[in-house]
Amino acid sequence: MLVQRRDVGDASSGSMIKIKASHGSYHHDITVPAHCAQSTFDAGSIGVNYGRIANNLPSAAKVVELLKSHGLERVKVFDTDPAVLKALSGSGIRVTVDLPNELLFAAARSKSFASTWVQSNIAAYYPSTEIEAIAVGNEVFADKRNTTRFLVPAMKNIHDALVKYNLNHAIKVSSPIALSSLQNSYPSSVGSFRPELVEPVFRPMLDFLRQTGSFLMVNAYPFFAYESNSDVISLDYALFRENPGVVDSGNGLRYFSLFDAQVDAVFAALSALKYDDIKMVVTETGWPSEGDENEVGASIQNAAAYNGNLVRRILTGGGTPLRPKADLTVYLFALFNENKKDGPTSERNYGLFYPNEQKVYDIPLTVEGLKDYHDNRPPAIGNQTVTTPVSGGGGGVSTSSSGNRWCVANGEMGKEKLQAALDFACGEGGADCRPIQPGASCYDPNTLQAHASFAFNSYYQKEGRAGGSCYFGGAAYVVTQQPKFGKCEYPTGTGH
């Protein structure tokens, strides 16, 4: 649904506005409180990694058509293969390319090598191929070839070459780091980089990113953390499903997903070095659809839940608990199952698609696709119900073992995130926000938390209380006792 603003009033005064909503050829006006009137709130972006360690993949031209047909507007590749870059020409798809680790030494040692590489692999294709970033190396600190000391000099030489060809404003230079480059990652608030990397690499790299207006690339895989700690990490927490959340003992923030906690550990590490201004792009994340017997959690159902709920989490906006305004660009790993990859079975089963272009599982990749998306959560065993702790904020919400479920706002997430989620629920989400108009039954108390709770619950019930429909980027959670905000009656739903 596309929503366009009209007659905007003052939200603080409780004024009403009309928004024109359209779905296909159907158009109508909806009157909602001004704070529900955002058309869409700022949201992140979804891309995909196009790896090619396989002998059975479709041609690059077919791959580009596949990307376009599923609404994917960003792709990341691990080299600068001419066939791929030519196929992407004129497609409108934004591209991140990679200078492989084995070329770091040459790029660091020789400005002329870096210049020639940029001329042949970037300038020769841009702008018809919309290259937007160069990943110089990949997880260099984990590379057994010990190329770490060449990283920053290589990044600088590649950037200088972009300057030479007047491409430095359009194309950013960075390098993906693995979470293993963190010394501490739990709780998120104590996130810090490995001390032996700080002075030789991180400070000069972060200075470079700051000076060039670039961003830090991070590869984050909650699957690995869950696989190794499934006895203490909730699967729901790892898969963005409804869960009580985990409170960070250091800063008091409540986390509802392992992904957010991992990202915030990197933000905390940046903050510890006084680089709070550096933005982040998650260049790889994913979940395998198959694994070896000891790879706990690897399954089609879990991969679909992780990637599907992640897409919803990113495209419906909102940052992390530590950085509420940090809307993320995230690249799913990967486009295809790659049959020639080494390692455990999972390594060959991260794909969204089989090599024959059929989906491994059906998840949305666009905002449009999210409208009909439900996380097909397996049925609960026995007579279990969802119970979650009370969120602070004085809403009078509590939990019980009742079979009913409601969705309420998490007051700990801050006004910006609640407002963004409320805008989505009342706009594209299609929640019934009429009862929270001035003078209507649920307008009082006139607070953001009360209005957001009503809107979130309306959306949750409309979606059949499907798994993940009471999430809103961590701005909401499920309770099993009826919420009490003034005299408002909340629609009820029976758990199942």
Image (cartoon, grey):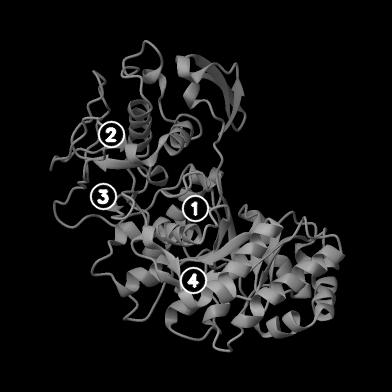
Q: Which residue is mark 3?
A: 244
Find out whether the residues at labels 1 and 3 contact each other: C-beta distance under 8 Å: no
Q: Position of residue 349 (x, y in %)?
A: 47, 74
- For the residues carrying marks 2 and 4, which lies nearer the camera in this image? 2
Q: Which residue is mark 4?
A: 350
Find out whether the residues at labels 3 and 2 contact each other: C-beta distance under 8 Å: no
- Residue occupying the point 32% across, 81% down: 293
Q: Which residue is mark 2?
A: 393
* Amino acid residing under circle 3: Pro
Mark 2 falls on what kind of element? loop
Mark 3 falls on what kind of element? loop
Q: How much space separates mark 1 and mark 4, taking CA atoms?
A: 16 Å
Find out whether the residues at labels 1 and 2 contact each other: C-beta distance under 8 Å: no
Q: How much space separates mark 1 and mark 3, taking CA atoms?
A: 21 Å
- For the residues carrying marks 1 and 2, which lies nearer the camera in this image? 2
> How dense is the environment of label 4, judged by Cα within 10 Å: few (below 14), some, or many (20 and up)?
many
Q: Which mark is residue 311?
A: 1
- Residue occupying the point 34% across, 49% down: 253
Q: Which of pointers 1 and 2 lies earlier in the amino acid sequence? A: 1
Q: Which of pointers 1 and 3 lies earlier in the amino acid sequence? A: 3
* Amino acid residing under circle 4: Tyr
The answer to whether 332 is drawn above or below residue 83 in the figure is above
